[in-house]
Amino acid sequence: MSSVRRVVLGIDPGLANTGWGIVSQQGMRLSCLAYGCVSTSKDMELAQRLKKIHDQMSAVIARFEPECVGIETVWFGENVTAGIGTSQARGAALVACAAGSLPVGEFTPRQIKLAVVGTGSAEKEQVQYMVKQLLSLDAVPHPDHAADALAAAICYTTHEGVL
């Protein structure tokens, strides 16, 4: 197995909840270092919500020193209003990544599901189960936004290859 280790940050952006996950990759072996969620209240002003996302993502980056980032792209679906908020949260997280000079891989929900489950049409529960299995976790990561962020990090490792 390769002795080179890479730390990958995964981000599942959202205005109410931005999930994050830290995955360590050594060769083909993946392990979870940490995960969490930045939550903001709808009662907060938009600018303050975005600042909180930026500041907390910056703190995660400073603490875990990832070499790269996998982030989910925005899927608007039928709720354009929610998509706009998610886009703004995504921007706040990306600014934190840019400040850390981190290379970013952007992946659609379908690409992430394909990388983790093997099918782009996987259900949320399937993704959560496979994240648990691939990272040898005792339980499915909660909240689900953190599990999705770990999935984005795993997707980055599949697209960028084995070290």
Image (tube, rainbow, N blue to C red):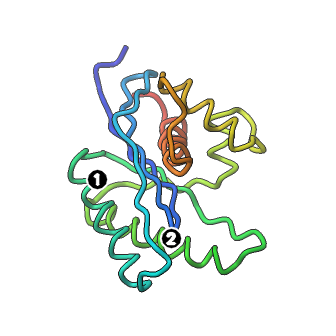
Mark closest to the chain's N terminus, 1 or 2: 2
Image x and y of residue 64, in percent: 25, 44
The answer to which quarter of the image holds residue 76 is: bottom right
Q: Residue 60 carries which label?
A: 1
Q: Which mark is residue 48?
A: none
Report the amino acid beneath label 1.
Val
Task: Name the residue carrying label 2.
Answer: 15
Q: Residue furthest left?
A: 62
Residue mark closest to the camera, 1 vs 2: 2
Label 2 Cα crowd, 10 Å radius (few <14 / some 14-19 / many 20+): many
The quadrant where residue 59 appears:
bottom left
Q: Is residue 80 above or below residue 127?
A: below
Q: Position of residue 111 (x, y in %)?
A: 65, 47
Residue located at (56% from left, 47% from top): 144
Q: Nearer the viewer, residue 71 or 60?
A: 60
Number of marks in the rendered image: 2
Residue 162 percent location from the top left of the image:
45, 28
Amino acid bearing label 2: Leu
Residue 27 percent location from the top left of the image: 40, 22
Vertical position of residue 29 compared to residue 45: above or below:
above
Circle 1 residues within 10 Å: few <14, some 14–19, many ≥20: some
Q: Please name the residue shown 37% across and 13% down the image.
A: 1
Q: Quadrant of the C terminus?
A: top left
Per the image, label 1 sits on a secondary structure element best described as: helix
Nearer to us in this view, 34 or 9: 34
Q: Is residue 27 left or right of residue 72?
A: left
Residue plotted at (40% across, 43% down): 35
